[in-house]
Image: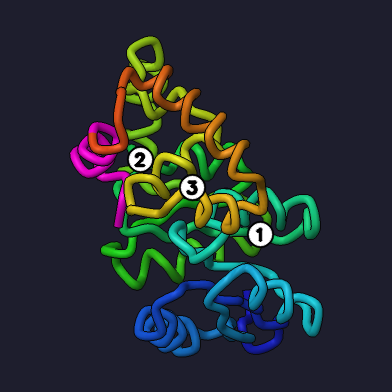
Amino acid sequence: MDMKAASPIRVLIADDHRIVRRGLQHILNASPGITVIGEASDYGGITEILREQPCDVLLLDISMPGKDGIEILHLLKKREPMLRIMVLSSHGPEQFAVRALKAGAASYLTKDGAPDELVEAVRVVARGRKYISKGLAESLANHVIEEDDQMPHEQLSNREFQTVRMIASGQTRTEIAKSLSISPKTVSVYRSRVFEKMGVRTNAELTHYAIKHGLLE
């Protein structure tokens, strides 16, 4: 394909760390046929940019302030079904990849990956395909094989999983309710479900589990 003749792939970067956004922007803008149209640090910033200009690929951090990456994925796929979304994460694929792909992500990459792989993934995803690295493919295969022996947190709904991460990060019931736009009573319901499914009795036990299994940044 003649990169000079083709329209550039328009990429939006969404990450709450400025230094990460600038690093990604440097890598992508240096690649022929790719241009970064903007940066966002939260869901509101993403939607504001998407209202103003078209975008082919969104690079989305899994851990965002307020609404987290999985919830943003769900919202954006309803709002912009043709938008191709690539999830970037500091976590290994075993924690979040399956959730992200089920939510509509076209790719899942870890932030310690090679810049060349990121560029290749953007090009593949922009063509309407999914990009699955060899390491992720192996992890997903193992996940399918071991599906009958799931970890407790893998049995949670996305909203319950969000609640786990927020409780473990020290947020109060009121803070969680505000972030998720639900009532404190509903947060308590999610908390009770989480405790039952995961077999824990206190927030301290839940926090210990989250840290041990890498569910927090």
Specify whether 178 is left or right of 201.
right
Comparing 2 with 102, the one in front is 102
Rendering coords of residue 75 (x, y %): 71, 53
Name the image quarter holding residue 213: top left
Q: Residues within 10 Å of mark 3 (few under 14, many from 20)?
A: some
Question: Crowdedness of circle 2 by 10 Å Cα count: few (<14), some, many (20+)?
Answer: some
Residue type at mark 2 is Gln
Q: Tell us which disc is closer to us: 1 or 2.
A: 2
Q: Say whether residue 157 is magenta.
A: no
Q: Position of residue 1 (x, y in %)?
A: 63, 73
Name the N-terminal-most of marks 3 and 1.
Answer: 1
- Check disc 2 and report the residue beneath it: 95
Q: Position of residue 8 (x, y in %)?
A: 66, 82
- Kindly tell me whether residue 205 is visible in this rendering: yes
Q: Report whether 213 appears left or right of 3.
A: left
> Closer to us: mark 2 or mark 3?
3
Q: Secondary structure under badge 3? A: helix
- Residue at the spot x=39%, y=32% of the render? 140
Residue extent of the magenta highlight: 205-217
Neighbor class of circle 1 (other Cα within 10 Å; few <14, some 14-19, many 20+) is many
The residue that label 3 is drawn on is 173
* Rendered position, 80 above or below 45: above
Q: How many marks?
A: 3
- Residue 160 lies, in percent from the top left, at 51, 34
Q: Is residue 134 visible?
A: no
Q: Residue type at mark 1: give it.
A: Arg
